[in-house]
């Protein structure tokens, strides 16, 4: 059986007719940037997340970049301020901080959940710390109650990186409504993906939302009047129209992912494979299903031989990237071990019961590091 890591064509084919209708509506409207579709999507996605505002932007990276930029413009942050961030995140989270002349302070994750470890944050707080940027990695929210307690105590802003967690909840509250602001990515492979690049910010902060509306559009609230040195980072009308079609499916698709994750967690039994742990108060959406194995490369080769596609999220931690070579001498042992051991199994709303069974059987049949 051939099981791709992710069948994106199959995922979008389910909505073929509705997507074509939406495309045709935008085509015929003659209006392609910042119009009715973006406005409607922003309303609908804010309602979905449970926030007052949603501002559509070009992609997930720019959602995070522009949140921090807006706070610089509003005098909340200034160059050189420190932002607490997990050491084992995707590079975009870190880029958003350095792009603004702010300083990322990398904090090790909890090895069980792979999310930032709140118990380790306090030791990293200094006089320049102004914000915490937790990432809801792999589709599971970070420990937001503990992070909020710290943020309140020390007067810090909290920005969620929601790129992998659309629809996830923490203590009943949706990702995107768990901080002062949240950056979302609708990159095609995410749980809620467009057919190209797209992103958004959700927030209850009126001043922030107002600044973002200008910053994404050359820093302009009114045509040809520029309040800020802004960016061109707008959510397309076309992507907004397609996302409106797909929003109706997010909860059911996430439930399907939970069902598959439930089977993996019950049925994969192997002394050399560690299954993911769900933190307290968490309702994850399993953007990826990440197991750990000291002999990870052998497990990946074995699954590949069985026709099962897997990926590594991620092979190289940010502090070992060439882009951040100034951090090369640093050591983050928990992060480094995670990067050596993780492997993402196929999980998606279009996987069949038989495919899930085949992945379970292949994992359980692995002969382990001995062979
Ligand atoms: C995908 C992703 C991003 C960036 O989103 P883009 O839309 O690709 O720019 C940021 N953070 C995390 C954790 C991601 O997975």
Image (spheres, rainbow, N blue to C red):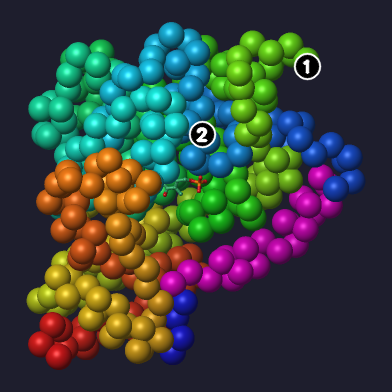
Residue 39 spot, x, y in % from top left = 69, 30
Residue 42 spot, x, y in % from top left = 62, 32
In the depicted structure, whether residue 305 falls above or below residue 346: below
Front residue (pair 224, 60): 224
Front residue (pair 25, 339): 339
Q: Say whether marks 2 and 1 touch (CB < 8 Å).
A: no
In the depicted structure, whether residue 203 falls above or below residue 319: above
Q: Residues within 10 Å of mark 2 (few under 14, many from 20)?
A: many
Front residue (pair 42, 254): 42
Magenta residues, dominant SS class: helix
Q: Residue at x 12, y 75 (%)?
A: 272
Residue 92 spot, x, y in % from top left = 42, 43
Tell me if I can see residue 235 in this picture. yes
Q: Secondary structure at mark 2?
A: helix
Magenta stretch in the rendered image: 5-26
Tell me if I can see residue 172 in this picture. no
Question: Does the magenta portion include 22?
Answer: yes
In this picture, residue 276 sits left or right of residue 98: left
Q: Separation of disc 2 and disc 1 at Cα?
A: 22 Å
Q: Secondary structure at mark 1?
A: loop
Image quarter in which the N terminus is found? bottom left
In this picture, residue 22 sits left or right of residue 292: right
Q: Residues within 10 Å of mark 1 (few under 14, many from 20)?
A: few
Disc 2 residue: CB within 8 Å of ligand 1: yes
Q: Earlier in the sequence, mark 2 or mark 1?
A: 2
| Residue identified by numbered label 1 | 223
Q: Residue at x 48, y 22 (%)?
A: 69
Where residue 63 is drawn, which disc sits there?
2
Front residue (pair 302, 52): 302
Question: Does the magenta portion include 258?
Answer: no
């Amino acid at each position: 059986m051939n099981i791709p890591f992710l069948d994106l064509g199959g995922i979008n084919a389910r909505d073929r007719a509705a997507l074509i209708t939406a495309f045709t509506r935008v085509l015929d409207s003659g209006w392609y940037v910042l119009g009715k579709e973006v406005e409607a999507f922003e309303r609908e996605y804010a309602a979905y997340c449970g926030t007052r505002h949603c501002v559509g932007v070009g992609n997930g990276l720019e959602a995070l970049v522009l949140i921090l930029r807006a706070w610089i413009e509003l005098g909340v942050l200034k160059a050189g301020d420190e932002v607490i961030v997990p050491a084992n995140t995707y590079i975009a989270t870190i880029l958003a901080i350095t792009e603004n002349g702010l300083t990322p302070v990398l904090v090790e994750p909890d090895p069980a959940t792979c999310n930032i470890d709140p118990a380790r944050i306090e030791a990293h707080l200094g006089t320049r710390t102004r914000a915490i940027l937790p990432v809801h990695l792999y589709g599971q929210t970070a420990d937001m109650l503990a992070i909020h307690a710290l943020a309140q105590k020390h007067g810090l802003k909290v920005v969620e990186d929601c790129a992998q967690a659309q629809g996830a909840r923490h203590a009943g509250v949706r990702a995107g409504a768990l901080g002062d602001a949240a950056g979302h990515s609708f990159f095609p492979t995410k749980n809620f993906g467009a057919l190209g690049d797209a992103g958004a910010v959700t927030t209850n902060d009126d001043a922030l939302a107002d600044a973002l509306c200008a910053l994404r559009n050359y820093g302009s609230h009114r045509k040809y009047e520029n309040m800020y040195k802004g960016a061109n980072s707008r959510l397309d009308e076309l992507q907004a129209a397609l996302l409106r079609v797909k929003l109706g499916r997010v909860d059911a698709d996430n439930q399907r992912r939970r069902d598959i994750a439930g089977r993996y967690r019950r049925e994969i039994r192997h002394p050399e494979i560690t299954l993911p742990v769900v933190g307290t108060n968490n309702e994850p959406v399993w953007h990826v299903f990440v197991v750990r194995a000291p002999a990870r490369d052998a497990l990946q080769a074995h699954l590949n031989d069985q026709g099962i596609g897997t990926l590594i999220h991620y092979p190289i931690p940010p502090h070992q990237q060439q882009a951040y070579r100034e951090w090369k001498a640093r050591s983050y042992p928990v992060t480094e071990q995670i990067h050596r051991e993780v492997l993402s199994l196929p999980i998606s709303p279009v996987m069949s019961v038989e495919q899930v069974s085949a992945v379970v059987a292949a994992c359980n049949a692995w002969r382990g590091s001995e062979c």
